[in-house]
Amino acid sequence: MGGLFGPAAAAGAAVRAAASGPRQLVRPSSGGPSWTQERTLVAVKPDGVQRRLIGAVIQRFERRGFKLVGMKMLQVSDPPCEILAEHYQDLQRKPFYPALISYMSSGPVVAMVWEGYNVVRASRAMIGHTDSTEAAPGTIRGDFSIHISRNIIHASDSVEGAQREIQLWFQSNELVNWADVGHHSSSYQA
Ligand code: UDP
Ligand code: MG
């Protein structure tokens, strides 16, 4: 964990994001259903960190069966917050944009990369509607948040968006490709 994103780092991230093409891990089909492995960016926003909800968020993704392949805590407080400007580039003309940047830089964020089958779509369902008032009970926003401006969590909304956001927030060497190697009690040898 750790690390501040300065303007240079953010600019570098932007270059990496532009240079790299879409990334999708495809497991070859051997006659059964084809399993498309995706990765997505999930971030516990400052209100989620302040309210000690990091563990609850991680627990939901782990219980669902997704694999954590990257995680770090960072504070994006330096105006003009290049990483946030890039992250929310599509929202820059929205009236709530200044308040959004202020909120997102008000405290640390925990950024994570989760991997798994259809994780982009599944994680959007898990976090719930953007407007917490509309978010269904059982979703993260529906369970923990009451207002659109303090909605706890971010998750990428498309495979292409996820690829862009992962490259913006993470260096490639901060992501870990790990495999299950049988650390379950049933596989222990005496
Ligand atoms: N947001 C806000 N007011 C609005 C709409 C959005 O404060 O009227 C914030 C909110 O934090 C939201 C973020 O802007 O999560 C990004 O908006 P987007 O439409 O991308 O929603 P999301 O993908 O996070 O569900
Ligand atoms: Mg969005």
Image (cartoon, rainbow, N blue to C red):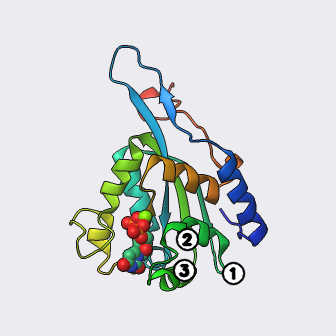
Q: Which residue is mark 1?
A: 78
Vertical placement of 98 versus 176: above or below?
Answer: below
Q: Which mark is residue 101?
A: 3
Of the image marks 2 and 3, the number of the one nearer the N terminus: 3
Q: Mark on residue 188?
A: none
Locate residue 148, reporting x and y percent: 34, 78
Mark closer to the chain start, 3 or 1: 1
Tag nearer the camera, 2 or 1:
1
How many other residues sit within 10 Å of disc 1, few (<14), some (14-19) or many (≥20)?
few
Residue at (50% x, 53% y) in the render: 161
Task: Give the amino acid type for the residue marked by disc 2 in the picture.
Answer: Val
Q: Is mark 2 within 8 Å of ligand 1?
A: no
Amino acid type, mark 1 = Asp
Q: Position of residue 130 (x, y in %)?
A: 33, 69
Q: Is residue 86 left or right of residue 3?
A: left
Residue 60 position (above or below residue 89): above
Q: In the visual, does 163 lie left or right of 95? A: right
Which amino acid, mark 3? Ile
First in sequence: mark 2 vs mark 1: 1
- Horizontal and vertical percent position of residue 186: 41, 29
In the rendered structure, find residue 109 and report the number of the disc placed on it: 2
